[in-house]
Amino acid sequence: MQIFKRVSDFVFGMECLGCGSSSESLDPWLCPSCRAKLLQEAKFAAFPRDDVVCLFPMRGITRKLVHALKYKNLSGVASYLVNRSSLVNGGEASVALGVYQKPFYFVPVPLHPSRYRERGYNQAEKIAAALANATGGMVCRWLSRTSFRVSQTKLSKEMREWNVAGAFVPRFIRQKPKVGTVFVVDDVFTTGATTGACMAALEEAVGLNVRVCTLLYEEPVTAIMDFVADNQVEWDAEGRK
């Protein structure tokens, strides 16, 4: 079966990240059917707060793509999702960002150095670069992470806030911008504890309006299930079932 799979992958291309089928019609991440599902989800940008824009809801197809971005070393999925979102296609996200003053400064949530070494890149930086490319903005690494604690996904809202309190500090900004809007960028928005801590660190340092932009919005009630799934993905990736 493994030999057959390798021959199939060679002939038809990689497996679809959505359904797992091998197809010569991948684009390069999804088959036509899963791509249609993604474009449908792109119509439903989420706005959990007035200052937060999430390009997609957390659904089966979007969740699998973000897992590939984080755990399968497929950093190109960041631009793939941004370019198929309503931000680029003139939908709700585009309208939402259109009310903010340009230029846009996209500040990725930093990874702790130990996690960066483990993963090889910061997915938030990849997302920020895609957002900057789509809007004519710029990526600004204006934050540092000072601590690495337990995963946020298994904590209550109050514990999440405690977990990231003081975890982010502003870097020295040689030339502070005088106009524009700052966006804290992350892969998923749940309760806002992480991005809120980043906003607090930036607002005084930058002196501009600070907002949030993420790929996905996840309802907080599903976070525990996602924590279990995330751990399984990392466990499988290391070959320890």
Image (cartoon, rainbow, N blue to C red):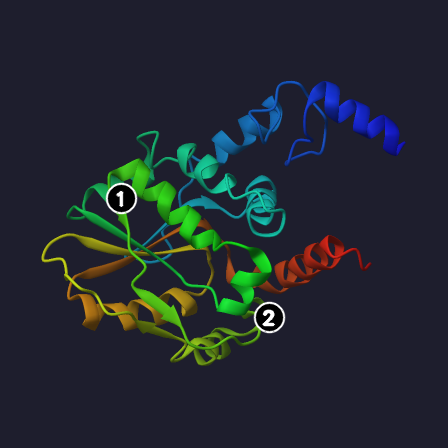
What's the mark number on residue 83? Answer: none
Assign a secondary structure to mark 1.
Answer: helix
Residue in the picture at 57% in, 75% down: 150
The image quadrant that residue 44 belongs to is: top left
What amino acid is at disc 1? Ala
What residue sits 58% from the left and 31% below the top?
A: 29
Disc 2 is placed on an element classified as helix
CA separation in Å, label 1 and label 2? 31 Å
Residue closest to the eye, 191 or 68: 68
For badge 2, the amino acid type reads Lys
- Mark 1: few/some/many CA within 10 Å (<14, 14-19, 20+): some
According to the picture, the residue beneath numbered tag 1 turns out to be: 96
Res. 114 image quadrant: bottom right
Residue 139 at x, y percent in the picture: 30, 50
Q: Is residue 51 above or below residue 77?
A: below
The residue identified by callout 2 is 154
Q: Position of residue 161 (x, y in %)?
A: 43, 76
* Place of residue 71 in the rendered image (x, y in percent of width and height, measured from the top left): 62, 51
